[in-house]
Every structure is written in structure tokens, then in C-alpha cells.
Amino acid sequence: MAKGRRPCVRCWLILAVIALVTLALTNVWNPWPGMWAWVNQSGTLAEPAPLWQQRVGALPRTVTIAGSAVIIDRGDAVEGRALASGGLAWEKTGISWNAVAGDGDGSVVLTGEMLTKGYQVLNPYDGSVLRTSADAVGVWTYRNLVIDVRCFAAKDCVLSAWDPRGTAPRWSTDLPGIQVGLNADNPRSFGTELLTAPRVSADAGGPQPAPGLLGLPIDGKVFVVETGTGRVARVADPGREERVTTAGGRVIRVLAQSADGTCYFTVTGHEAGTGREVWRQTALNLRTTESAGCAQRSDPSGGRNVVLGVAPDRREVIVDMYDGRLLWTGDPGDRVLSVDDRFAAVHTEDSRMLRGYVLGTDSVAWSRDADADTRASIARYAVIVVEADPDRVIALAPASGAVLAEVRSGADVLAAGPAGLIIGDGRDIGYVPYGSQLADGGTSDQTGAPPADAACTDPAQPDCGLSGK
């Protein structure tokens, strides 16, 4: 029996495409925009779904919650969106760098162009220009300060500090040159490196407060500038086996000497103005060296005023850089995942528990089950916990461990505010508000307005009138 001829499926597909193209070209019916929108549409970033979800113009480099605005750095552009809805409020293109300074409703956005002097200070809510600098070659952005540098010659520069929304500098001081990169935002300086976690942006907590002392590399030396007064308190000339940095209002010297097939460490803290040694810790490894040899090429990790180190018995410790006190000593095998000046998040040796500590106390503030892949990052208002298999993002109150938000999501955490998280995957971002429990000092209106800072009692803090003791 003869077989019937099969229909030419390929022919029918070609005819269908020709018909669709003809309809589109004659303006009878154009299906392509709708089809492309359907192909390009995104699934929800989390379950439960975010309060809002938006697609931005390009892959975001950083996202910052600035009061009731969300500032998105797209590399060659910056955009501001409403925190309440995610709607686009303004956009500025044709720039090379941008950074956020200030806090809450006092935040500002700084923008500039690569290899071009100057920058603009923008209002984060509408993108309007608040102030313009025509000749700055570098700028550092903090929660309470903007510090910029202008150079008139290779060895003739002026460093100035501004309130984020100020119109006149707080102070200015002369410097013999300074090292800046191609992008003018936050050039290299000495200090502490924040511990980061996969899937959590290192800048999730927003701008850091200005350190009491800013260490600037100039001609192989470290110029130590008091950020409260602008005074150059010390010019340190590190030895061949030494690394000099600043933390906790002190000049920190880390000596790493090679002998007997190992590295011997001595860490000392000094008054900036007099150079007097205030404290000393021997055999404290701040992990400033590489895996082989004793050459120091890294700053210590920690918060602004505390650093993470390893004691001679290989237990991790957290040290106050102002007076050298051990604020926390781990059990054998414990691993610090994140630390700031107040709290620490620690993975236990058996990888079954994640524990939170209030620095300076011996007791566990909170604990929760964890596995070997659990990671955590302290982002000012919340401890961000990310889990895998299944993917989850959890925000905890740093002091109590109370759950602020929990979603099933494989997205990254881009920003953490007092009332919620910004998560993202590719060009898609979304806002996950906290539940009835808000972060310490958070506001119930979910606008992102920050709490007032706690009373200043620590002389190591930059706003406590530190004068280079």
C-alpha cells in the first residue's frame, strides 16, 4: 500500500513567517512588539513576590537606598527611582562614575566623567544639581562627609571636606600630590576591608561613616589626615617588613618578619599626633600577607574600628583598634562571616549553626540553624543571610536575630535599608519590605528614612571630636 505524502511542515512555517512579515510591512498587523515583550518578560524575583519589581536600562553595578529614593549605578548612567513604587524619577547619561554620600533624606549623588576634572552633586529625588566642583580630581564619599582633592601641579594639591549638602568646605589642607585613578570616586586609601559574602553587595548598607583618620598613599609614605579638622597628623614611612594603615582613630603598624620558615607578627596602635605607642599585640595575624612569604599587600578585614585576626592558637579574634582589646574570641573552628563595629555573624565549627554576637559581650545574642553553604553579611540595618538548595534570602535584626524578611529567591541582595531590601537578578530589581518587625530604629512608613545615630560615647568614632590623640 502506498504511503501518503507527509505535509511539508517546514514549507508551512516559511509561508507563515512570510505572511507575518507582509502584514507588518503593510501596517495591517505587527505582532513583533508584543511577541518580543512576551519573550523578554521576567518572572518574579522572589516568592512571596516583592512589593514592586522593575527592569532597569542596563545591568546595575551598585544600588543604594537614599532616603525615599533608590539610586542605580548603570556604569555609564545613573538613575533615581521612588522607593515606594520603583518608578523612574530621573536619569542622567553620559557619565563615567557616580557615588552616593550622606544619609537618609540628606543623601546626595555625585557624578563625574573619566579623565575629566570636577563633579556634580545631585538631589537623589529629582536629579537636580545642588553643587558643582570644576577642578577636583578625586572624591571620597561617606555617610557624614564628602572629601575631595584638587591639584594645581604634580606636587601641589588641596584636600577639602564638605558636608554632603554643604556649599562651603568645612576645612582645606595642603598636600604634596596624591595618587588617583581613572575614575575619581573613592581613590585608594588605607583602612580596613569589609568582609563580603556571595550574593550580597559589599555596598549594601550604603555609605560608611568617615573614619577618624584617613590614610593617603603619597610618594611611598602614608599621610594621615584627621577628617574632623583636616590636620596632617602624621607622615608614616613604612619599613620593608611593615604595613601602615589607619583604623579606630589610630595609626596601625603591622610588622611581619620571616624566620624559622614562618611569619612572626607584631601589631601596634599609635596616637596619630604624637606617634606614641598605645597598645601592642604580638603573634596576632591580621591576614595582611599572601599565602606564601611575609610580604604584606592587603589591609586587614573588619569594620571601621575593629579588625578580624587569628590568635596563636589559630582561633579567630576581633580586636578593637582604638585600645587593642579583644572584643570576641571564637571557639576552635569558628569562622567569622561578617563583622562591623557592633556585631559579628559567626559560622560554628560544625557548620550547623549561625550565631550573632554583640561585640564586647561573651554571650550569644542569637542563633539559627545553618549548613555549610550558608553565608551572611552585616549591612548596617540587617544581617543578610543567603542559603542555597533551596535558595533563600533572609534579613535578621542584628541585635536580636528576629526575622525581618524571608523569601525564596536566588537573586542578589543589592541594598539594605531600615525598612526593606532591594534584590536583583540581571536587569531586574525588586523591593522586599520587612514585615511587622523593623530593623533597629526603622520606620513603619517604609520610606527608608534612617534612625538618628546613637549618642556618641566612643572617642574612636569620627564624630566624637577626635583630635589626633
Image (spheres, helix red, strand yellow):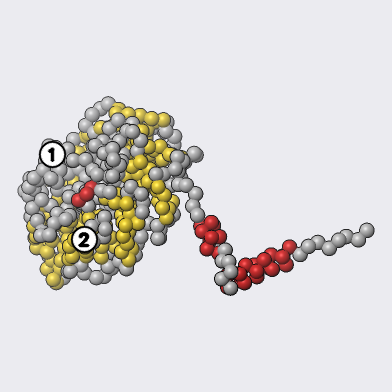
Seen in the picture, residue 450 relative to 99 is either above or below; the reply is: above
> Residue 442, located in which quarter of the rendered image?
top left
Nearest to the eye among marks 2 and 1: give it: 2
Q: Residues within 10 Å of mark 1 (few under 14, many from 20)?
A: few
Give the CA distance from mark 2 to mark 1.
28 Å
Of pointers 2 and 1, the one earlier in the residue sequence: 2
Q: Is residue 387 left or right of residue 453?
A: right
Q: Label 1 is placed on what type of residue?
A: Cys
Foreground residue among 319 and 89: 89
> Residue 284, located in which quarter of the rendered image?
top left
- On the image, numbered disc 1 is attached to which residue? 456
Foreground residue among 52 and 290: 52
- As drawn, the residue found furthest toward the right would be 1
Seen in the picture, residue 216 relative to 201 is either above or below; the reply is: below
Residue 147 visible in this rendered orientation of the protein: yes
- As drawn, the residue found furthest toward the bottom would be 26
Tell me residue 212's x, y (percent): 14, 48
Seen in the picture, residue 76 relative to 191 is either above or below; the reply is: below
SS of the residue under disc 1: loop
**Image mark count:** 2
Quadrant of the rendering where the C terminus is positioned: top left
Seen in the picture, residue 238 relative to 25 is either above or below; the reply is: above
Tell me residue 426's x, y (percent): 44, 54
- On the image, numbered disc 2 is attached to which residue? 121
| Label of residue 142 in the image | none
Foreground residue among 310 and 337: 337
Q: Is residue 215 left or right of residue 287?
A: left
Residue in the picture at 28% in, 37% down: 444
Tell me residue 159's x, y (percent): 13, 61
Residue in the picture at 23% in, 29% down: 361
Residue in the picture at 49% in, 52% down: 42
